[in-house]
Amino acid sequence: MNIASHTLSRRGLLAGGAAMAAIAPGLNVSFAQQAPTTTRDILVVLFQRGACDWLQMLAPAGDANYVAARPTIRIRTDGNTPGIGVGTLGGTDMYLPAVAPELKTLYDSGKLALIHAVGIPTVDRSHFTCQDMMEKGGADGEPEGNAGWLARHIASAGTGGAELSTVAASATNPVALLGEPTAIAIANTDTFNINGGTANANVIRAINSGPTSDYKKIANAALDAVDDVQAGLRTLSDNSADAGYTNGALSQPLRSLAKLIKMNVGIDIATVDYGGWDMHNSLTGEFNTRTTEFSRAINAFWKDIAAYQNRVTIVTMTEFGRRLQENASQGTDHGSASGIMVLGGNVAGGKIYGNWPGLAANQLVSGDLRVTTDYRQVLAEILVKRHRETKLASVFPTIAYSPLGFMNA
C-alpha cells in the first residue's frame, strides 16, 4: 500500500489504535501517514528540563561579581579550557562553554541567535509549576489555561489536523501540546510498531479478518499505516550516519525527527525534551557532559536537515535559571532568569539579544539574575514572523507584541 494513497483521517487511525487496545489489552500503536510535500516552515521546540544554568551556558566570565560568586565552577577566560567568546551584551563579554564549539560554529554562521536574561515573570521556583506555567504560556497572576501554548497557536493559525503535522519526539506529548488532538508522540522512528512487533500485529490482523465492519477496517488501516511508515523509512535516503550524532540522549530523538522531516510527512510543529539540568551538586562535570551532547546533537541535526534549513526554526526553552552564588556542594540552586537559543535559516544570528541586567547585589532579585525579557516575547516573534500567526492574542493574551529583531520575516 502506498502511504500517499491512504484516505483515512488521523482521527480514524487514532480510533484504530483504541480499537486494537480493546482487542488486545496492553497493546499500543504508533503510526503515521504520508502527507503531500509542503513548503511551510517547521518549528522545533526543544525543552531543557530541569532548569539549565544560563550563567554557565552563556557566561559573563570576566564579570567581577560572577568570578566572586562562582569560585570553583565558573566558566573561565583563561587556563587550559577557557570559555569561547561570542560577543557582548550590555557591555559585558559573554562566553560559551569550552565543550560547545559546535554552537560557536553555528553562531558564526549567522544562523544561531542567543537571548539572555529570559524567563517567566514569576517568583515561583518549582520545576513542576514553572514548566507547567511556561508550557501553557502563562505567568504569575494570570488564569491558568486548559491548553498548551502550541495547541492554541495551532488552533489560531489553522495549521493542525493534517497527517503528522504535530509530532513529539518523545514517549508522550508535552503540556505545550495539551488540547491538540492530532499531536502524536513518536519516540523513535526505528521502532515504529505495535508493541510486541510483527507477532502481535499478525494476531490483530487475524482477529480482524472475516466479515468486515467499520471497526475492523479502522484497526487494519492502522496496521497498514505502520507497515507503510516502516517501508518509507527503509527506502529513505538517509545521510544521518555522516552528520555527527552521538549515542547520547538528545541525538536519538533529533535523529528520528530529522528522518521524519526528510520523509516530507507534513510536519509543522515538533517538540523534543532533553532533561537532567537540575545540577545542585558537583555541577562542572555533569554540566560539561550534558552540554557536550547538547552542542553536538544540535549541530548534527542541523547538518542532517541541510536541504530543509531555510524552513526550520529551532527554539530552546528551560523553566528557569540558577542562583548566581554557587552552593556548598559546588552546584547551583533554583534561580530566575535563564536564556533561549534560536537556530534557523531565517534567524538573524551571530548576535546576542536581550537586556543584560547586571550581577551587582542591587541588580539581582533575591540573589537571582533578573528577568528582563518575557519568554513569550521570544516565542511570539517566531510565531508571527515565521509561522503564520495573525491572532497572537489567542496564544498569549496578556502580552503586547514586541519583537527583539532576531527573526527575519
Image: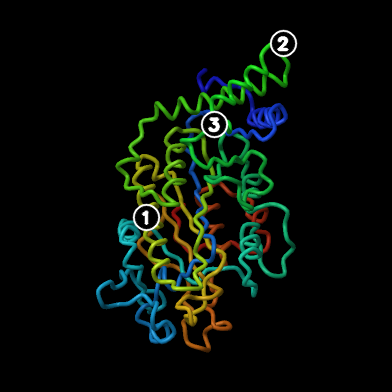
Instruction: Give the camera-side residue of 44 and 15.
Output: 15
Q: Position of residue 121 (x, y in %)?
A: 62, 71
User: From what the image shows, is residue 200 above or below residue 409?
Assistant: above
Residue drawn at x 50%, y 61% as measured from the top left: 276
Where disc 1 sits, the SS reads: loop
Label located before the other in sequence (2 or 3): 3
Instruction: Give the camera-side residue of 133 and 98.
Output: 98
Q: Which residue is mark 3?
A: 193
Q: What residue occupies the far bottom of the structure in this picture? A: 362
Residue drawn at x 48%, y 82% as measured from the top left: 328
What is the distance, in whole Å, between disc 3 and disc 1 at their CAs? 36 Å
Q: Which residue is mark 1?
A: 111
Label located before the other in sequence (3 or 1): 1
Q: Is residue 224 left or right of residue 83?
A: right
What is the distance, in whole Å, between disc 2 and disc 3 at their CAs? 25 Å
State which mark lies toward you, 3 or 1. Answer: 3
Q: Amino acid at mark 2?
A: Pro
Q: Position of residue 303 (x, y in %)?
A: 34, 46
Q: Which residue is mark 2?
A: 211
Instruction: Give the camera-side residue of 117 and 78.
Output: 78
Residue drawn at x 56%, y 74% as measured from the top left: 334
Q: Position of residue 195 (x, y in %)?
A: 58, 33
Residue drawn at x 43%, y 41% as measured from the top left: 258
Q: Amino acid at mark 3?
A: Asn
Where disc 3 sits, the SS reads: loop
Q: Is residue 291 left or right of residue 34?
A: left
Badge 2: residue crowd in 10 Å (few <14, some 14–19, many ≥20): few
Q: Position of residue 332 (x, y in %)?
A: 49, 76
Pointer 2 with pointer 3, Cβ within 8 A: no
Pointer 3 with pointer 1, Cβ within 8 A: no
